[in-house]
Structure formats: C-alpha cells, structure tokens
C-alpha cells in the first residue's frame, strides 16, 4: 500500500512528550484493568507500577522499531541516537540461569535500592527457585555461579548486572540483539510485502497524541501514520515482532491488540478533527506489520483489520465461546471505578 499523489501536507511532529503525560489512560492500562482491576489500582492509582523484565524478543522488537522508524536503517544514526535510549553491552548476555538471576536482581535493585545486596540477592534467588532453577543448590553456590567467568571467556552475570545498574533508565542490549534487529529492520524495509509502508514523505513516526474520550483524558503514541492528500485518507501502521508471525491472529487476541486497534483510531480521529483535517477519513482498520524473530527467517507479513474488526474492538465480541470486552465497556468501567474508588 503506497502513499499516492505528489501533494505534500506539512504536518509538524507533535510537541507532546508521551512519557510526561500524566493522569491519562492508554490502551495498555485498559488491558491491565481488563485482566485484573486490582492490578490497575495498584499500578496506576497507588503508583506502584511493575517493572517490566525485558526478554530477547522484547528488546529485538524495540531496537528494530527504533532502527526502522527513527533511523531509517542508517546504522551510523543508530549509533549516534541510540545511546539516549539504549546501553550497548559489548559483551554477550548468556541465556543461563545466572543471567536470569541477574535480571531478577536488577529488578530488586531498582525497586529496593536501599536494601542490602544479600537481601536483594536472596529475593532474586527465590524467584529463580520458583522457576525450577538452581535445583538443590544453595544461595552460596548461586552467588559463586553469578560471579564466575565463563570457561570460554567473556562476561559473567555479575558483569552484566553491574553494567545494567550503571545504566539504569536505559534498556541494555548486546551484540546479538543488535544483529538480529538490523536483520529484521533491513528485511522490513526491503521486502515487497512491506517496503511501501516505509516510503514517501507523508509519514509521521512515533507520533504522540493527547486526546479525550467522553471527558476522560487519554494518550497514545502511534508507531506510524501516513496520509494520502489526494484522496484525503489517513492510514495507521503498527510494527510488531513475534516469534511466529504466521500465528499473529492468536497474538491479536492474547495480547489485546484489538484494543490497540480501536484506541489508536479514536486517537487519530481526535487529532485530525482538532488540526484542520476534519475532512480526512481514516482507513477502516490498522495495518499490523509483523516481523518474525525465529531462526526460520519467515518473511514479514501484514495483517489489516477491517471495519467489522474495529466495531468488535469497540463494542466487544466473542470467539469460540470466549467473551472479549470492547473499548466502550472498559472505558465505562474504568471511569466508574475511578469515580467510586471501587476496584
């Protein structure tokens, strides 16, 4: 799907800083409420937000997105700009239990920095035990494993931990993450299925929008939206990286992407209406551009939602007997819960 026409409508990058918008709902918060209202209360009312633990897949997704959307696959620009968001760990993060222990210790340190090291280490060790790691091992054995250098050379889990703590506020990535991300970004930019999404001047990337729904303050950050000025149509694109992009329809339900589908459309509709573009329409559904992170190196695929999908995402729907609440019901429930203080 290419942007047609030669006219150019100059749209300035939004001066809204997404991270600084407070007391506003986003689609991820709706997902949390839908899953467990008490978690919503704990995280977004009391402010005890859970620390997300990065995985290889989530890091590859973030770096691929940054490379493609903000650096246009220019590796030099990535090196120059990436340091603001990522910390480049030039060693290799291992996949063994000692590095899982390091990740849990990083979480504990961020959450309880004032606690002693051994106290934090014990809690991280207990989490590993709960996942069947370090079976029949003592905490002393785990500490030695944590500090031990690999026999083949390289960095210990302790080296990785120290580097991560020195770079709190940034996401730590290693050479494996960078290499895989570069491969996926190039594939997305060059493959005939997806390359046209990343061509043309009328593309707005990482576009934050502060908007309202029935008087409720909301916020969204669109990966990308494009505009066809000849036909006055706006298109919303979202980049996903998944282990099996041929199973995206399962992920669409499991990860609540149907809420993102309708939430982003309402956000952009609000922005167009408030920026002298009321006569522009939005393509009935979003384009989910899905890259495959597995060793199979499957080609990227594009899943386009329909007007019917958008309606279902708003009003709710059922699949094989499982009911999924739509945006309308969830927004009403959240509004009521916040007003009454009942979760």
Image (cartoon, rainbow, N blue to C red):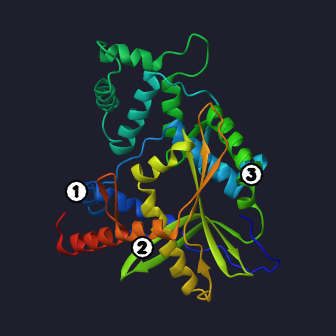
Distance between the Cα atoms at labels 3 and 1?
42 Å
Give the structural element (helix, strand or loop) at label 2. Answer: strand
Instruction: Examine the image and state in which quarter residue 297 appears.
Output: top right
Provide residue 264's location: percent of width, then percent of height: 50, 69
> Which quadrant holds the N terminus?
bottom right
Provide residue 208's location: percent of width, then percent of height: 55, 69
Provide residue 90's location: percent of width, then percent of height: 65, 31
Q: Residue at x 55, y 14 (%)?
A: 150
Residue wearing tag 3:
189
Q: Which of 65 and 19 is in front in this view?
A: 65
Distance between the Cα atoms at labels 1 and 2?
20 Å
Query: Total marks drawn?
Result: 3
Distance between the Cα atoms at labels 3 and 2?
32 Å
Q: Which of 93 and 330 is in front in this view?
A: 330
Instruction: Examine the image and state in which quarter residue 332 appears.
Output: bottom left
Residue wearing tag 1:
38
């Amino acid at each position: 799907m290419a942007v047609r026409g030669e006219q150019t409508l100059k749209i300035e990058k939004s001066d809204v800083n997404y991270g600084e918008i407070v007391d506003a709902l986003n689609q991820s918060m709706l997902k949390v409420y839908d899953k467990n209202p008490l978690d919503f209360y704990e995280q977004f009312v009391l402010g005890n937000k859970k620390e997300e633990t990065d995985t290889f897949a989530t890091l590859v997704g973030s770096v691929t997105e940054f490379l493609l959307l903000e650096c246009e696959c220019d590796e030099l620009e990535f090196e120059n700009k990436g340091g603001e968001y990522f910390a480049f760990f030039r060693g290799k993060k291992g996949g063994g239990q000692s590095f899982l222990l390091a990740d849990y210790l990083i979480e504990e340190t961020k959450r309880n920095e004032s606690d002693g090291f051994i106290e934090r280490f014990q809690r991280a060790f207990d989490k590993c035990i709960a996942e069947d790691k370090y079976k029949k091992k003592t905490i002393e054995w785990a500490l030695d494993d944590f500090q031990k250098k690999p026999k083949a050379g390289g960095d210990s889990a302790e080296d990785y931990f120290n580097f991560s703590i020195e770079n709190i506020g940034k996401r730590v990535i290693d050479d494996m993450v960078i290499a895989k991300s570069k491969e996926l970004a190039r594939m997305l930019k060059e493959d005939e299925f997806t390359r046209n999404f990343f061509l043309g001047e009328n593309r707005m990337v990482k576009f934050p929008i502060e908007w309202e729904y029935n008087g409720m303050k909301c916020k969204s950050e669109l990966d990308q939206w494009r505009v066809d000025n000849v036909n006055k149509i706006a298109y919303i694109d979202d980049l996903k990286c998944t282990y099996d992009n041929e199973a995206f329809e399962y992920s669409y339900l499991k990860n609540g992407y149907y809420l993102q589908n309708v939430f982003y459309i309402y956000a952009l509709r609000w922005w167009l209406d408030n920026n002298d573009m009321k006569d522009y329409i939005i393509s009935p559904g979003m384009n989910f551009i899905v890259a495959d992170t597995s060793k199979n190196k499957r080609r990227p695929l594009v899943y386009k939602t329909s007007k019917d999908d958008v309606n279902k995402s708003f009003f709710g729907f059922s699949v094989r007997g499982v009911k999924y609440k739509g945006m309308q019901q969830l927004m009403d429930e959240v509004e009521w819960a916040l007003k009454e203080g009942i979760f």
